[in-house]
């Protein structure tokens, strides 16, 4: 085998080795991109689920707060009504008493 044939054989082997390494690197890169994408999607789904849960919790809290506010307004109105009625009753009682 001549030097030129040996050199050509070495170059062919190097080219084959380089092509195999590039294919392996490409496969590793693709696997890494796939894993990264899967992680990002999992994070996004978790974030959406968390936001949905927070939104539902906030809606429930707002409904509870509305109910408390309505109950407080009703109680305040009832107290004010009782005060007015008591004042009217005292006024009537005062008017009915004979004046000296």
Image (tube, rainbow, N blue to C red):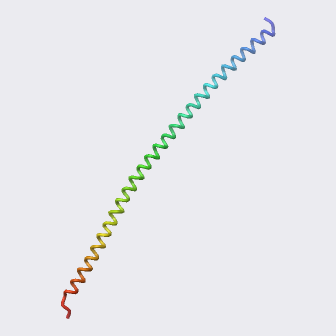
Residue drawn at the location 63% of the way across and 22% of the way down: 24
Residue drawn at the location 56% of the way across and 34% of the way down: 36
Quarter where residue 3 is shown:
top right
Residue drawn at the location 32% of the way across and 63% of the way down: 71
Percent coordinates x, y for residue 91 in the rendering: 25, 83
**Frontmost residue, 92 versus 6:** 92
Compared across the picture, whether 74 is left or right of 36 comes to left
Quarter where residue 32 is shown:
top right
- Image quadrant holding the C terminus, namely bottom left
Quarter where residue 89 is shown:
bottom left
- Image quadrant holding the N terminus, namely top right
**Frontmost residue, 61 versus 6:** 61
Percent coordinates x, y for residue 21 in the rendering: 66, 21
Q: In the rendered view, tell whether residue 69 sits above or below residue 79.
A: above
Q: In the rendered view, tell whether residue 80 sits above or below residue 40.
A: below
Q: In the rendered view, tell whether residue 28 sits above or below residue 73.
A: above
Check the image and name the residue furthest to the right. 3
Check the image and name the residue furthest to the bottom. 100
Q: In the rendered view, tell whether residue 86 sits above or below residue 56.
A: below
Compared across the picture, whether 77 is left or right of 50 comes to left
């Amino acid at each position: 085998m001549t030097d030129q044939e040996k050199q050509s054989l070495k170059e062919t082997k190097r080219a084959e080795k380089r092509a195999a390494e590039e294919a392996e690197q490409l496969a590793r890169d693709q696997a890494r991109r796939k894993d990264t994408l899967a992680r990002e999607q999992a994070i996004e789904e978790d974030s959406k689920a968390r936001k949905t849960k927070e939104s539902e919790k906030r809606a429930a809290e707002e409904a509870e707060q509305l109910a408390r506010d309505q109950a407080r307004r009703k109680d305040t109105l009832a107290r004010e009504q009782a005060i007015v009625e008591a004042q009217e009753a005292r006024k009537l009682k005062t008017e009915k008493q004979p004046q000296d």
